[in-house]
Image (tube, rainbow, N blue to C red):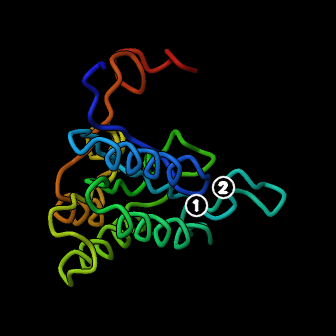
Amino acid sequence: AMGIKFLRTYNVHFDQAKNLLEAIQQLKTEDSNFEMYVMLGIWIDCKNAFNWEHGEPDHNQESERNPVEVKTAVELTKKHPEIVKVLAVGNEAMVKWATEYYVQPGVILKYVNQLQDLKKSGELPRDLWITSSDNFASWGGHGREYHVKDLNKLIEAVDYISMHTYAYHDTHYTPDYWI
């Protein structure tokens, strides 16, 4: 009724994404004019993210859960290719203020390249867009610590840049706003 035709999820490790896709599929089956699409988020984090009893977060190693998250997203996309139009590898997964879970750009790049290869081979739809959803700092808009070779490769590997921006957060204008 509101004209919303595109929804975004953040992960696939809970049933919400699967249930959403199944609900949209049922609505499309009931009404062939029903139109709704999904940007399916793939949660990516570092080793020991949110699991400190196993040690401090290791931002240079990825979580063992990441390959499972990617595999599940691929399976859901194959099952619902007419609904899933974008795969977003990570959600603010590279920004350094996400101290509990951030990863280096090479981790995101690895999965973006893997998904792009699946598109090229025909295993995933060729019109599927692959991106990473991160804030402007992670895309190179902040300090020098973000300006690394893997980020440049990632910028070239995605189909488009999905960038989060915040008017008063994480900027040089009000650096203490959210602290």
Q: Pick whichever, 157 or 69, lies toward us.
A: 69
Name the residue nearer the viewer: 147 or 35.
35
The C terminus appears in which quarter of the rendering?
top right
| Residue sticking out furthest to the right | 53
Q: Going 53% across and 19% down the picture, which residue do you hit?
A: 178
Which residue lies at the image location 46% right of the left edge and 52% below the top edge? Answer: 22
Relative to 57, residue 170 above or below: above
Q: Residue furthest bottom?
A: 121
The quadrant holding residue 149 is: bottom left
Mark sitting on residue 124: none
Q: Is residue 125 above or below residue 120?
A: above
Q: In the figure, is residue 53 to the left or right of 146? A: right
Residue 116 location, x and y as percent? 24, 72
Do the residues bearing badges 2 and 1 touch, measured as CB atoms within 8 Å?
A: yes
In terms of image quadrants, where is residue 55? bottom right
Tag on residue 46?
1
Residue on which disc 2 sits? 49
